[in-house]
Image: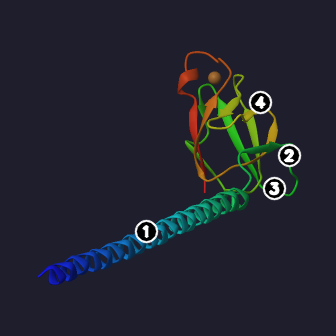
Amino acid sequence: MLEIEGFSFLGKIVTGLSLQSSLESVTIDLKNNYFRFKEELVLKKWILFAAVLCLVAVIAACGSNKGNSEPTTSGVSEPNTAAPEVVIKAKSWEFDKAEYKIKAGEPVNLTLESNGGVHGIDISKTDIKIANKKTKAVTLEAGVYDIVCNVPCGNGHAKMTAKLVVE
Ligand SMILES: [Cu+2]
């Protein structure tokens, strides 16, 4: 009896030990897995980080490319002999056309001729101003701009507007 009990006691110890060792191995396994999991997570974070960096670089590159490929924005310079000329005729209180058309991204000599009254023009969305009997070479991006008289010229001054269609 005693011996059997001893055996069973031993057996319990043995079982307990093997249980403990198997628990240990499970713990170690879990630990290893946990660390592996953690490593993977760190690796994934780095991959994600690298991917985001690449994306940012690509977007930045696209942005700067776009900036470079765009035609020179609203440039104004002295008359360019090679450029076509568009004459805007003004009188009190109207321009000779409701709409003037020019090409986008290419210099055009814009001339203001006032016949009757003193007028000048501002081109909206730009800082281009042309005084009477003056010519300026302008290069504009596609769009519709307003031409307005910039000289207080009397009753109809506010009505002196026209469109500059750049396409
Ligand atoms: Cu005016």
Amino acid, disc 2: Pro
Residue in the picture at 69% in, 49% down: 140
Residue highlighted by disc 3 = 83
Q: Quarter of the image containing the C terminus?
A: bottom right
Q: Mark 3 Cα within 10 Å, few/some/many (few <14, many 20+)?
A: some
Depth order, front residue of 110/36:
36
* Residues under numbered marks 4 and 2 in contact, where contact means CB atoms less than 8 Å apart: no
Separation of residues labelled 2 and 3 (CA atoms): 8 Å
Residue 100 in percent (x, y) is at 61, 47
Could you tell which of marks 1 and 3 lies nearer the N-terminus?
1
Mark 4 lies on residue: 132
Q: Which mark is residue 79?
A: 2
Discs 2/1, front: 1
Relative placement, left or right, of 20 versus 63 is: left
Quadrant assignment for the N terminus = bottom left
User: Hey, what amino acid is under mark 3?
Assistant: Ala
Instruction: Specify few, some or many for label 2: CA neighbours under 10 Å numbering under 14, 14-19, or 20 or more.
Output: some
SS at badge 3: loop
Q: Give the crowd class for mark 4: few <14, some 14-19, many >=20 residues within 10 Å.
A: some
Furthest toward the front, the residue is: 2
